[in-house]
Amino acid sequence: MEFQDIVGFLRDPAVATIIAILVVLATALAWLYRRFRKPKLEVSLEPVMSYPDPEYAIPEQSPRKFKSQTLRLKAKRRTIHQCKAKMSIDGEPDYLLWDPKSTREAKDLVPEEEVQLHVWQAVGMSENAWFYLNIRKKAQVDLKTLSDPITVEISFLSEDGLLNKKPYRYKISGNSWDTINMVTFQLSK
């Protein structure tokens, strides 16, 4: 078969039509693969957890007590590389930390592995209690002064971009040790 025979074969309208159909089909399949193989993130709010002082030799004898609330995250379909949780409070953005004792803002999430992301922590001692958000700009807030609920929005990002179409909205309320809580918040229509 010579070069002219190949050119003649490719000029045949039936062959050109088949090649065009294959190109369109391959493009459509590539788009579908990218669309449905994007990582997905499942997010659920865990109930408030109370626990003894983790830094005390005999935690039950510590004068401090702790409460916290987390989000349970699970990657679906494939690994989410460099996942970050961006929290906005009254339009002020900051990032949640993956470990309250570090400054790590990003983490790879492996498919089907559940991970806890701490959102807030409260520390109680005698009649006093303080509240902290698990963000870079940590601020101690006396629970007694937390009279108005705090509304937060959390968006999840990866190296591929935004993972959720709309931010998750939560309301943190309670001005005492017994009432501090975070709940899902829906905007009224």
Image: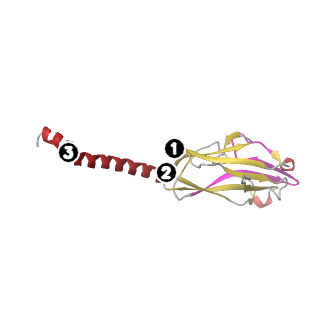
> In the image, 89: left or right of 37?
right
- Quarter holding the N terminus is top left
Q: Quadrant of residue 180?
A: bottom right
Q: Residue furthest left?
A: 1
Front tag of 2 and 3: 3
Residue at the image point whose x is 69% and y is 47% from the top? 153
Q: Going 81% across and 45% down the picture, which residue do you hit?
A: 141
> Which percent across, then down, holds residue 134?
70, 47
Marks 1 and 3 sit apart, C-alpha to C-alpha, by 43 Å
Q: Which residues are magenta?
A: 114-140
For disc 3, the neighbor class at 10 Å (few under 14, some 14 to 19, many from 20) is: few
- At label 2, the amino acid type is Lys
The residue that disc 1 covers is 160
| Front: mark 1 or 3 | 3
Which residue position is annotated with label 3?
A: 12
Task: Please tell me whether the stretch drawn in magenta is mainly helix, strand or loop.
Answer: strand
Give coordinates of residue 78: x percent, y percent.
Answer: 48, 53
Type of the residue with mark 3: Asp
Tag 1 near tag 2, CB within 8 Å: yes
Q: Which residue is mark 2?
A: 38
